Image (spheres, helix red, strand yellow):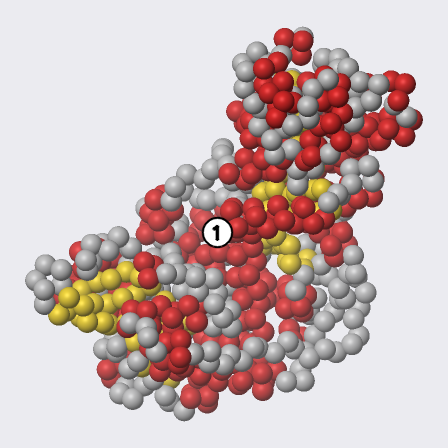
Amino acid sequence: MNIQTAVRPAIPFAVPASRWDDAAAAAMSPAELLLYRSNLLGSDLTVTNFGGGNTSAKLTEVDPLTGEAVEVLWVKGSGGDIGSMKLDGFATLYQRKLLGLEQHYGGPDDDDKMVGYLPHCTFNLNPRAASIDTPLHSLLPFAHVDHVHPDAIIALAASAGGEAATREIWGGRIGWLPWKRPGYTLGVQLRDYVAANPGLEGVMLAGHGIICWADSAKACYEHTIGLIADAASYLNSRLAGQPAFGGAVVSSSPDRAAIAADLMPRLRGLMTGQKPGSRRKVGHFSDDAETLEFVNSADFERLAAIGTSCPDHFLRTKIAPLTLDPVRLQDDAYLAEKLTAYRALYAAYYERCKRANSPAMRDPNPVVVLVPGLGRITFATDKTTARLAGEFYGNAINVMRGAEAIGGYIGLDEQEAFDIEYWLLEEAKLQRMPAPKPLVGRIALVTGGAGGIGAASAARLMADGACVMLADRDANAVEEVRAGFAQRFGKDVVRAVVCDVTDEAQVEAAFAATAREFGGLDILVANAGIASSAPIEETTVALWNRNYSVLAEGYFLTSRAAWPLLRRMKDQGGSAVVFIGSKNAVAAATNASAYASAKAAANHLARCLALEGAPEGIRVNVVNPDAVIKGSRIWDGDWRKERAGAYGIDSGQELEEHYRNRSMLKRDVLPEDIAEAVWFLASDASAKSTGNMINVDAGNAQAFTR
């Protein structure tokens, strides 16, 4: 890496402003105003990170049993996100019962016990579980309470100079409480502190965030926004004109995307040492300005080793990141050594800190990987979790920048960090989560992804949890399919790339994009195809070559490009290639010599690759469809007319009826039928099958494989 001589000023904190709309709020009920306030706060990343923070209001409701007016605490439920939640995301509890819980509280050792009493306070049989922070809201005597974790606030809360800065900014209007893990004890400490200091408008919770209050939803929202703006403006005044983190000592590589595409699959393949049956990892790469400012800096290694501070950050990112030397990224032995050392350090941390009743050690692999000049890579068992972990570490970087500017960054105490990570309540929450879908952690690339069979195959894989890269030469069509899948399955799990499988450079670029977007590859579905029909005397060299270029060479190019990624997963259980062949690959067809022989070539290529792939854990199998007319783009062009002409029939419904009646089962074959066979051959359901063909043709004796 080159030494960077230019001194760049630190990236400033964003200063939020109120987005409250009086006209929009005018007709809202008290509960709807709470939701409106919550959504405004949570949808602004300068205010709080995904899933972070909680809001509440004490509202008057009619008791469904007695018909009496009662005070009910509406508070964000466990596991929700205030930016996207709906009304059913709030837990509702009798405030009188919540206040009565103190008779069961005997001191800090009772925190976990007190959580067990919360369900007994539920109002109106609301199934939404109350969060661990509920006592912070119920024990304060204010109508509206916000507790958020904005970067600018946590920068104060996690700095050696944070308490002094809090006094300087707000002149005693905002109090300060030392670190205490969330729970009933913190709620009691907060209540007593506020009672002993009348006139406070909020309290800074060291290492944790801020809690503040007001008498109305609008006033509470604007108070929260104002406090964050105050903190951000103060930090910006301290950062102004100064380089962050001691200044840059390396420059960012101009080839970051290519480096990430090469590095991520190699790291992913080396992430062993997990429990048997553990899911594979999915990666997320970011080279945003904040991350590059941090990883390129003089203080990078020192600060990275401290780890994160706020519990919300820590639970997503582990005790500390893995850092790599940018000049040794091509050395697999070095990468393996670094991962082995990280796992050993994590195991030692577990052994030092574990309690008699601690859950078993979890996956010891790193979540966050930082590389000077490159950026940030995060790994998790699904794409959304990997992306969010990266965003949370981005929050942590911002916190470090601000904390260092006012007195030095303070990380979470190791034992406290462990007690949060291995909290029995957190473990119970994990155990209650539904089992992941079978293909979570798998990454697939589907060529011809905008077509009927390609799109159906991609949908089937995503339905079982896989991430999918759709590759197709039609840019508009593949983007339309991607957008539809993003709505259906979520935007994290699907990407699209323009790729003509006859273009070697485009093929290589498609697999590089897959590696960069998801971290590697587990499944290749080679499906891109064309179809043509002509008697041999009318088959031109151009037509012959076009069939072989797409159906034979295209399958070769995609397989060759996939191979280095697929073999990386040998120690993770192997990988799978599925060719979409054709009935015509095993059964001769009239007036289709170019198409049928090219399909036969591809099928034989699959057999050859099955031999080569077996030692690498790569299974290669073929699905042979027949007469997939409905939903298939191939049949939208001349192929329909040409095949109808070959049989001397009409190209409309008569052709579909011809194929249906020709089959032994007298049934139509749909793209979704092919997709089921693709799923089988790509999944662990066929873990002991390679070199095989499955016909999905409603029965055709001529095409029986042998």
Residue 197 in which image quadrant:
bottom left
Q: Is residue 179 above or below residue 16?
A: above
Counting from the top left corner in percent of width and height, residue 649 is at: 69, 19
Q: Is residue 184 left or right of residue 633?
A: left
Front one among 382 and 660: 660
Q: Neighbour class for label 1 at 10 Å: few (<14), some, many (≥20)?
A: some
Tell me where residue 178 appears, x and y as whole percent.
37, 74
Q: Secondary structure at mark 1?
A: helix
Which residue shows up at 39% across the image and 41% down it? 434
State the quadrant of the N terminus. bottom right
Residue at the spot x=9%, y=67% of the render? 68
On the question of residue 390 being in view, the answer is yes
Please tell me which residue is depicted at 60% across the width and 31% down the height of the picture. 630
The spot of residue 115 in percent (x, y) is 25, 57
Question: Is residue 581 shown above or below 5?
Answer: above
Is residue 460 or residue 434 the one in the foreground? 460
Q: Residue furthest bottom?
A: 171
Depth check, front residue: 589 or 625: 589
Q: Which residue is mark 1?
A: 349
Give me the residue at 79% from left, 24% from top: 533
Number of numbered discs present?
1
Quarter the C terminus occupies = top right
Corner quadrant of residue 653 = top right
In this picture, residue 262 sits left or right of residue 397: right
Q: Position of residue 374 (x, y in %)?
A: 71, 59
**As rendered, which of 381 and 88 lies closer to the eye?**
88
Quarter of the figure with residue 528:
top right
Three-letter residue code for mark 1: Tyr
Q: Give the answer, above or below, for where 580 lies relative to 508.
A: above
Q: In the shown orientation, is residue 54 left or right of residue 5?
A: left
- Is residue 355 visible in the rendered image? The answer is no
